[in-house]
Amino acid sequence: MNIFFHTNPQPQDNPQAPREKKFFDGAGILFLSLVFGFLGGVIAISVMSGEGSFTNLLASITESKQDQPAEPAQEQEQVVGVVERVSPAVVSIVATRDVQVVERFRSDMFSDPFFDFLFPQEQRIERREIGWGSGFFITSDGMVVTNRHVVQDEKAEYTIFTTDGGRYPVQVVARDPAQDLALLKVQQDLAIEEDGEVSNISFPFLTLGNSDDARIGQSVIAIGNALGEFRNTVSVGIISGLGRTISAAGGGMVQVMEDVIQTDAAINQGNSGGPLLNRFGEVIGINSATVVGAQNISFAVPINNVKRSIEQVIADGKIVYPFLGVRYDPQTYIVESVVADSSAQEAGILRGDVILGIAGVEIGPNRSLASVIRQYRPGDRVVVKIKRGEDILSLPVILGEFEG
């Protein structure tokens, strides 16, 4: 590593180099005279007027500098305070599963796999970590929010780790593929203490904020299990965009996500499911996806988009949301297919129709179809405005039900 002093270049033995100027030449003396003359005049006027002294003048200059607000320091202390307060409610999630391991006993002389048939193999089942992510408590009895893709393997077992060294088995209570949301619950009956007793444990939990109040440029804090190794890693950034539509891939699945928050807070693999917080420590989003190869372009699911699902799980143990029954291009809202026996098919919506609005609310870059439908419940009657060729149609639809 090369290290350089960052200085201005000094003239060398170069005949073309400019001659060094001496400070005390004629112009320098004249300048100093003017400066000291001005200061002397200020001092004299101050003393003669009886309005103060030179000491008071210097004091006023010093006070004016000290009165300047130390905003960066205050902001830093605020971030530190938020992190210290909320970190105990952020957890790391580890997925484990029985996997088949095959080992061959071969000689170094025959290390090439071509000779595998010459040597015996051993097959055994081992329990291994197959994935990790982040989450956070939302109730004192151990309800945890995370992303669906963090717990998508239905054959795996999941364990959470807290900042105080606690380790608790959890059960997946509900998965919501539409919002990339999942809710877990600590299995209190399996959380046995060292003395063998089973007791209900009270967990610290986070407050859900209002993501509708989010603004571009607003400071945010992300906390999560970065790379599955660095638990409760903290990064700070701003909201870079709102209402984004993205197509996220991972774990063998591709999902279109609408109305998400874009942030430049560093979010790495393993941060998925962790909270995106405002400066008050309130959750305004669930960190979900990042752009590989970009400089800090990441996305979070707005917390308001999933509040109803969370409330449903706490009350009924499942997620049910309204379902129209169309697959469409999220940029143009052109219907690509209609689900058989769905509300859309019964209402007469066809492939190639362009969805313009729902219940009088216009669909567009600032208001996605999913965000409008989320305002209703299964069984609600709405009017869907579509464009078919040159015709504009209004079709009444009774929203169906889909269970996550």
Image (cartoon, grey):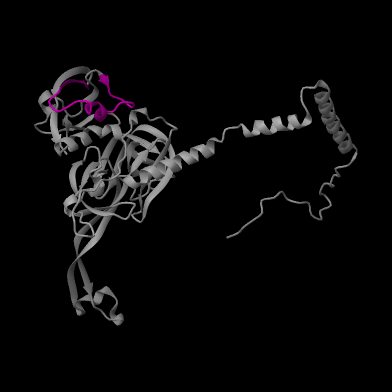
Direction from residue 379 to residue 146 in the image, left or right: right
Nearer to the camera, 121 or 80: 80
Q: Would you place residue 270 above or below residue 380 in this image?
A: below
Picture quadrant where residue 361 is located: top left
Residue for point 21% across, 45% down: 184
User: Which stretch appears magenta?
Assistant: 361-388
On the image, the x and y values in percent for residue 302 come to: 31, 34
Residue 4 part of the magenta-drawn span: no
Q: How many marks?
A: 0
Residue 374 part of the magenta-drawn span: yes
On the image, the x and y values in percent for residue 205 come to: 30, 41
Direction from residue 70 to residue 226 in the image, left or right: left
Considering every residue shown, the one lying at the far right of the view is 26
Q: Is residue 30 visible in this depiction of the protein?
A: yes
Q: Quadrant of the C terminus?
A: top left
Q: Is residue 330 visible in this depiction of the protein?
A: no
Picture quadrant where residue 289 is located: top left
On the image, the x and y values in percent for residue 246 come to: 32, 38
Q: Would you place residue 14 above or below residue 294 in this image?
A: below
Nearer to the camera, 350 or 141: 141
Q: Quadrant of the N terminus?
A: bottom right
Picture quadrant where residue 141 is located: top left
Residue for point 27% across, 81% down: 107
Nearer to the camera, 265 or 10: 265
Residue for point 23% across, 45% down: 142
Residue for point 78% across, 51% down: 11
On the image, the x and y values in percent for residue 23 come to: 85, 43
